Image (cartoon, rainbow, N blue to C red):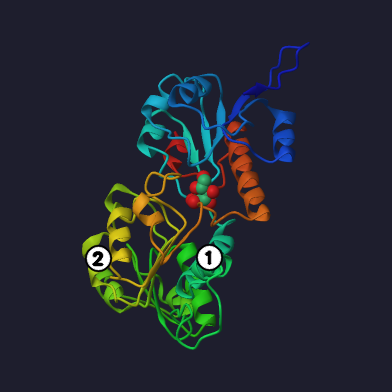
Amino acid sequence: MTTQANPTFPSTKPKILVARAIFPEALAKLEESFEVCSNQSDKILTPEELQKALSEVEGALVAGSERIDASALSQATNLKVIANISVGYNNFDVPAMTAAGVMATNTPDVLTDTTADFGFALLMATARRITESEHWVRGGKWDQWSIVNNPLGMDLHHSTVGIIGMGRIGQGIAKRGLGFGMKVIYHNRSHLSDADEQACGATYVSKEELLRTADHVVLVLPYTTQNHHTIGAPEIALMKPTATLINIARGGIVDDGALAQALQEGKIFAAGLDVFEGEPQVHPELLKCRNIVLAPHIASATEKTRRAMVDLAIENLCAALAGKRPPSLINAEVFST
Ligand code: 8YV
């Protein structure tokens, strides 16, 4: 890690940690106002390195790779804010952060459309067997056009998409589905308002009904202990053998071992996964599946959106260190105390 303190005059600027590589322009902007300890090597800090780095700063920019819990915070006596460069914040132990008086922030909204676009792209690639077809072509197996002996996929248009987790991104996927003439059903902790249901053309159903009737199941719910293995062998057993399953939510929402077995046994048609249990490791049995599209957690990964996420995280951090309420504060009780 490098610190950018002025070597001649001791810096009076607040110290911050940038735990992962960010865009150089964003780093330069931070260096105007802060003494920045930055990990531009992008090598993920060990828990010990993170604990030490947090003990020396007033604020930190982190990503999903940094687990922020009581142990990470145990020596962080001056820390006021940790800004996640991510909308999901299952890497935060929010009660521990609140107990330590540390503001927690995330990056909602700025990635909604980019992530919904990707969810739809993954759904299309999975249902229409695009990566499998590419391997087929590259492998020299395409010797002639055929009516039946080509990779035949499943239609999206006029099919039923079932969305589990109907927050901003889920609603974005629903709206894209409407453009394809899809019937949209959803399951969520709470019902959408009538106006939002109408805007998405979406109907609330039980999880069981969704799994039984959807042609395509898309997972967009946040990871919590309660949501662990929302989809495992019993849930897959309810799905149609012709159905696809898309996970752009978080690893651990799906039991990857059970999914691999179901794909190998043809219990469902195919799966598209952007997130994995224990990523960046991928369950070895998933790697053996033909009927799967795999992506390295890139749903929000366009340059424009990643810049917007970094900018929003910086805005959150700067507001907190200036004594103002960060725009995307998660634990409001810390600000009001
Ligand atoms: C992040 C994401 O890039 O925002 C989220 O919740 O899944 C991605 O956009 C990833 O979590 C890294 O922090």
Between 275 and 135, the one lying in front of the other is: 135
Report the residue marked by disc 2. 235
Residue depicted at 30% across the width and 74% down the height: 210
Q: Is mark 2 within 8 Å of ligand 1?
A: no
Q: Quadrant of residue 241?
A: bottom left
Q: Quadrant of the N terminus?
A: top right
Report the residue marked by disc 1. 135
Q: Position of residue 202 (x, y in %)?
A: 41, 77
Residue depicted at 53% across the width and 57% down the height: 299
Q: Position of residue 155 (x, y in %)?
A: 46, 82
Q: Position of residue 159 (x, y in %)?
A: 42, 83
| Label 1 or label 2, whichever comes before in sequence order | 1
For residue 36, side relative to residue 66 (left or right) = right
Residue depicted at 42% across the width and 40% down the height: 91
Per the rendering, the mark at residue 191 is none
Residue type at mark 1?
Answer: His
Few, some or many C-alpha atoms within 10 Å of disc 2 (few <14, some 14-19, many ≥20)? some
Residue type at mark 2?
Answer: Glu
Between 9 and 258, the one lying in front of the other is: 258
> What whole-number distance in Å separates the C-alpha atoms at marks 1 and 2?
30 Å
Q: Secondary structure at mark 1?
A: helix
Q: Quadrant of the C terminus?
A: top left
- Whether residue 172 is visible here, answered yes or no, is no
Q: Position of residue 100 (x, y in %)?
A: 41, 28
